[in-house]
Amino acid sequence: MTEIEITADLVRDLLQDQHPDLAGLAVREVQGGWGNQMWRLGNELAVRMQRMDPTPELQLNERRWLPVLAPRLPLPVPTPVRSGEPSERFPKHWTVMTWVPGEPLDQGSISRGDHAADTLADFLRALHVAAPADAPVSTDRGAHPGNCTDAFEHFVEAVALGDRAAEVRAVWDDAVAARAWEGPPVWVHGDLHPANVVVSDGTLAGIVDFGDMCAGDPAWDLAAAWVLLPEGAASRFFDAYAHADDAAIRRARGLAAMKSLFLMLMGQNGDRGLPGGKPNWGPAGRAALDRVLKGV
């Protein structure tokens, strides 16, 4: 199916059709997004439009589970308030959600590293509880790093690492060799990177884009100690989180290496003008990889 151009007029028309009481609010495009496109709706809401995601499952998972998780999370997260159904005008799903104020980290920075480390640890402790049996599961996110070696190899081959390649591979190999998660599958955000968190006053202020949330290994989120936090903050984060053993930290560090390579590849694609590329993700990925290689 040809990609449909999503415009402010289309968003307003869809609201008029399905939620006319919201159609009078101002509609403003939010830059970024790939699988979904976001539009600000008034001051308090946003419209999340399914764009490149081939199936609606990610949005449907957010609709089903974010209202369950949000009340016990210590940071603001987008919470669905209305559902938009496929129609002749737009044959995909869309959701009206609460707006999480702040600046995306890929366009901002964290200057209060200790505060951000404590804030992230508090958030992940609250999120990482045993997930119910009907929680979504993924074949890669939430799984042991050993299940993702093909993806890691793809990123290594696609990104020019030079003399650092052997060091990065050693971190990954150590993660693959680490003991698997032995507890019950817990709720995992699954995609914590700089475009999926917002900052304010130099620290973390909210977490967004829960489309990849699933039940699995918390190491997928613990990787954020290197991917999100400034240099030197990982140690404080793990002390505050207090539930990660050596094996979990090893798995998390390898996953952080893979996420860093992903950010670098997206930046590389952006520099080349390729679809979906993000030029500003390259520097974020390189800085994250530097932190990964320095360890905790």
Image (cartoon, grey):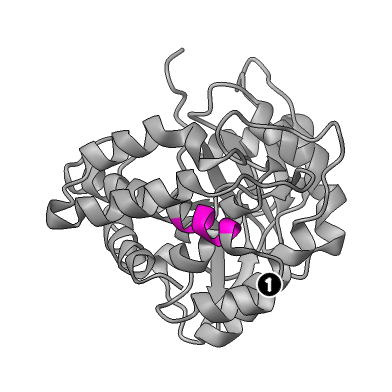
Please give the name of the residue rendered at 59% of the width and 53% of the height, measured from the top-left corner.
219
Please give the name of the residue rendered at 71% of the width and 66% of the height, measured from the top-left corner.
243
Does the magenta-highlighted stretch encompass residue 250? yes
Q: Which residue is mark 1?
A: 241
Image quadrant where residue 92 sits: top right
Residue 76 is at least partly visible in this image:
no
Crowd tier of the residue under label 1, counting other residues whose Cα lies within 10 Å: few below 14, some 14–19, many 20 or above: many
Q: Amino acid at mark 1?
A: Tyr
For this view, does 11 lie left or right of residue 25? left
Q: Is residue 270 above or below residue 2?
A: below
Q: Is residue 110 above or below residue 56?
A: below
For this view, does 281 lie left or right of residue 160? right
Q: Is residue 209 above or below residue 199?
A: above
Name the foreground residue: 200 vs 47. 200
Name the foreground residue: 261 vs 55. 261
Q: How many marks?
A: 1
Task: Please state the horizontal and vertical placement of residue 25, each as a whole percent of the image.
Answer: 68, 53
For this view, does 60 lie left or right of residue 201? right
Classify mark 1: helix, strand or loop.
Answer: helix
Please give the name of the residue rendered at 26% of the width and 57% of the height, measured from the top-left corner.
167
Does the magenta-highlighted stretch encompass residue 150? no
Image quadrant where residue 152 sits: top left
For this view, does 171 lie left or right of residue 48? left
Task: Please state the horizontal and vertical placement of residue 78, each as a whole percent of the image.
Answer: 71, 55
Q: Main secondary structure of the magenta part?
A: helix
Name the foreground residue: 77 vs 127. 127
Please give the name of the residue rendered at 22% of the width and 47% of the height, measured from the top-left corner.
268
Residue 154 is at least partly visible in this image:
yes
Task: Please state the horizontal and vertical placement of residue 127, each as a whole percent of the image.
Answer: 76, 58
Q: Write down the region rendered in magenta.
A: 247-253
